[in-house]
Image (tube, helix red, strand yellow):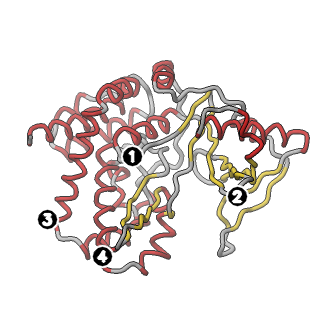
Amino acid sequence: MEQKLMSKKKPTFQINVQLQKYLQTYNRNTKIPVSYDDLLRFSGSIVVYDRHDEDTLWVRCYYPDFEREEIDNSLKRVYLILHSDGRSEHLDFLNVDAIDYCTFGNSKPFRIKIRNVLNDNFTYFYVKKADASRIYGLDFEHILSPNRINFLVYKDTLIEEHIAGIPGDVFIKEELPECDSRAQTEIAKQFVKFNERCTLRLLGDMRSYNYVVIPTHDFDHVDYKIRAIDFDQQNYEGNLKVYQPHFFKENRPMVNLVSERLAESSIEQYRKEERSQVAKRLITSEKRFRMLIRCMIKDTVSSQDNVNQLRSELVTYTKDIRFKRCKTMGHILKTALDFVKRNYLDIE
């Protein structure tokens, strides 16, 4: 059933002039010294295995000696631009430990491992082909979720910071069975909130490997948050179920946990809490949201068939006939979020 929810492959959408202006206004558009195509020039690779000796679908790339030094210096500069002021005096303290290429998924990203040679701390960032719908997804996450997103765009290259956490599929398989009763109830609550947030902002394909679970140790217990890490499916598919994580079979253990741990009244309470939080973020970020959604309304980030299908399904789901007037995916998202904001203000 779930395999039929989504299209086989989503195309890449070019960044239009209006979106470029938005990125410049909010300091997302910055000149960088390396492009996605530069990294494609690797001369060889080997498979990267996980700690269970299973193929991760990533390969480690190797470059000719005469290119590697230039690529390493460029990547270290990108790291400094992303996380600091971009000044070169710190270059000698950084080392590029690995350049990995993912053979799975739409974006075919490169994952760069950067290590501080003074203390051996390391982190990652990603180099991807710039895609307009993904950029919309990243910035809507920044505006509408409790999480901040750090990314840069230059021409056809997208740089994203790494989002730390336990991959959802790994957490479900290895960590969830070991959680105590209180922790499982907290995780169920967070999945309800995550599910609601994805539905409200029309972020699709949140199967378990497209989000992370983040445990935070408090003084007497562990709290959990669920955070999206893949934004390719922002307003692309026509099937409304794609934007509701509980319909994916990979999330069935989470759905079962919600049924076991939460009463219907609690589930509805947490859904209302999340809708209220999204509405508040809309109000406090109104200027930025308005500029971004205007770009998206004028943009093409899906097929007309998908627009028609999603529009029809949202009319049925919300009983709001305003969706019937929507001509683009941006217009659909604006109408959906106006619906959330209007209901919040009516309650006040």
Bin the neighbour count of mark 1 within 10 Å (Cα to Cα): few under 14, some 14-19, many 20 and up.
Answer: many
**In the depicted structure, whether residue 221 falls above or below residue 344:** below
**In the depicted structure, whether residue 251 falls above or below residue 17:** below
Q: Which residue is mark 4?
A: 182
Give the residue drawn at x 21%, y 47%.
317
Q: Mark 4 and mark 2: span between their CA atoms?
A: 36 Å
Q: Nearer the viewer, residue 103 or 126?
A: 126
Bin the neighbour count of mark 4 within 10 Å (Cα to Cα): few under 14, some 14-19, many 20 and up.
Answer: few
- Among all residues in the image, which is located at the extreme right? 66
> Is the N terminus in the top left, top right, bottom left or bottom right quadrant?
bottom left
Which secondary structure lies at badge 2?
loop
- First in sequence: mark 4 vs mark 2: 2
- First in sequence: mark 1 vs mark 4: 4
Q: Residue 265 — which label? A: 3
Q: Is residue 78 left or right of residue 25?
A: right
Q: Is residue 273 left or right of residue 218?
A: left
